[in-house]
Image (tube, rainbow, N blue to C red):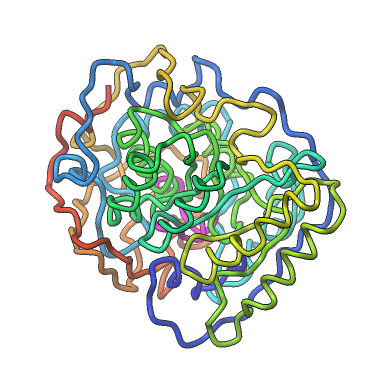
Amino acid sequence: MVPSVLHSLLVLAATLSSVTAHPAHDHDDVVNAALPGDWYHPEDHPVHALFKRGDDGVNYAAVGTPEWSAGFPNQDPMPVDGANLPKAWVDALNAAVKAGKIPDIPVSTNPDQTFPKYPSGFDPNGPTVCSATYKCRNKEDIWDAPDGVFASSFDDGPLPDSIPLYNFLKQNNVVATHFMIGINILYNPDAFKTAYEDIQSEFYDIAVHTWTHPYMTTLNNLQLLGEFGWTMQIIHNSTGGRLPKYWRPPFGDSDERVRALAKEVFGLTTVIWNQDTEDWSVGTKGGSTIDQVNADLEKWISGAKSPGLIILEHELNNNTVGAFMKAFPLIAQNGWQFESLARLNNAQIYQNAADNTGDVTPMSVGNGAAPGSTTSAGSTTSGSSTPATGSTTQPTSKSGSTTTSAPSTTGTGTGGSSATTGNNGAMSFASSSSLVSLVAVAVAAFALS
């Protein structure tokens, strides 16, 4: 996917009129083609202390109810401003920082929404920063599937237009991984339930695509904590307590600080891609065309099988979903093994569960704080290395609308302000037939252990 404000808007069906300049993401280098055989995190990983298990006696509120949506940020401005974070998350972040596990890299700036820009002395292609936007590959990130494997995944759901895709996957008895935007789950509970409950969850593997789809390297640590944490929490609460194992950065925008925070605090492995359809831009001024998307898919599927394919595709609308459906028969015809990305190498799908239907594996869970028990969210003195402290501000509840003003949380590191400004990451969200009601306090079903 290419960095552009257009995609952030398209994710949630806003009306568009132009496309900004953007870098290409045709990652050609073959690195880490074979995936590790053991992708789940050990029981002593901090992530298991941050969320309740599905088998701990908690009766989770039904998806789509006011009790289910209680406590999640539905705020203007965006991205998540780092306010009202559960104390357990902030404590885990501070412990990782103190242990030297989060690199001290300044936040990037990205005013033209193309390539992230770092201060002098921080090479985005060097080992210190290693920006995925610049095609720098961290050996722990996943860019390629094993030889001969078509690793299927889709970004940006759930949306109403996702449902034909979910039905298609079930009809063809195949599974894909869905990198989900947290606030899209909040605003589209019916689409989520169609996938995970009505269609049967064994056809639907879930991963993280952040809460509001921002440029992640432009955010400070507390904002990152919110983008990861709230998405993990709503997936956890909606799937009987499962914890996703994988995340994909919006626009492919990740670096060593962001990926370390994802891994060390939340146990997430970063997934990128080795081919990009740019399907999200079909129908926009200056964007791709459906003929071009179809031609690219046919070229890649009929091409070499080393490395295996991880193609960036979206479940945004009929164009993006239709392109996959048209190309689907070619996958088998060309001898590919179709597999959900989360199931590569027969790995278990979630950190604490082997699949979508079996029991959640018991874990040693520490004492956490309920979402209503908040900590620090005011400011940090650098992008990464300062423990999180500060004041708490209550998010403003909105009914699916956003403005373009900057988040209240700021950073003062050498990379400049960590809050994104203007239209960066601002979106209007495509809601289901009725938006869920939001309440001000967390309920027991949402309480952290």
Give how far across and how far down residue 122 sits, in percent. Answer: 69, 56
Which quadrant of the figure contains the N terminus?
A: bottom right
Up/down of 150 relative to 357, above or below: below
Asked where in the image residue 359 lies, by quadrant, the reply is top left
Please tell me which residue lies in front, 107 or 242: 242
For residue 197: magenta? no
Q: Measured from the top left, where is residue 306 in percent x and y?
A: 86, 46
Q: How many marks?
A: 0
Q: Seen in the image, is 408 located left or right of residue 440?
A: right
Which of 379 and 62 lies nearest the eye of the viewer? 62
Horizontal arrangement in the rendering, residue 170 relative to residue 331 (left or right): left
| Residue 401 lies in quadrant | bottom left
Q: Nearer the viewer, residue 64 or 134?
A: 64
Relative to 342, say whether 248 is above or below: below
Q: Residue 87 in the image: state x and y as whole percent.
A: 30, 32
Which region of the structure is painted magenta? 212-222
Residue displayed at 40% across by 50% down: 223
Viewer-proximal residue, 19 or 341?
341
For the point 37% across and 16% down, the residue is 365
Q: In the rendered image, which quarter contains the C terminus?
A: top left
Q: Residue 364: image x %, image y %?
A: 40, 12
Q: Relative to residue 105, is residue 295 depicted above or below? A: below
At x 69%, y 29%, the residue is 345
Q: Quadrant of residue 48?
A: top left
> Is 276 on the left-hand or right-hand side of 390?
right
> Magenta includes 214?
yes
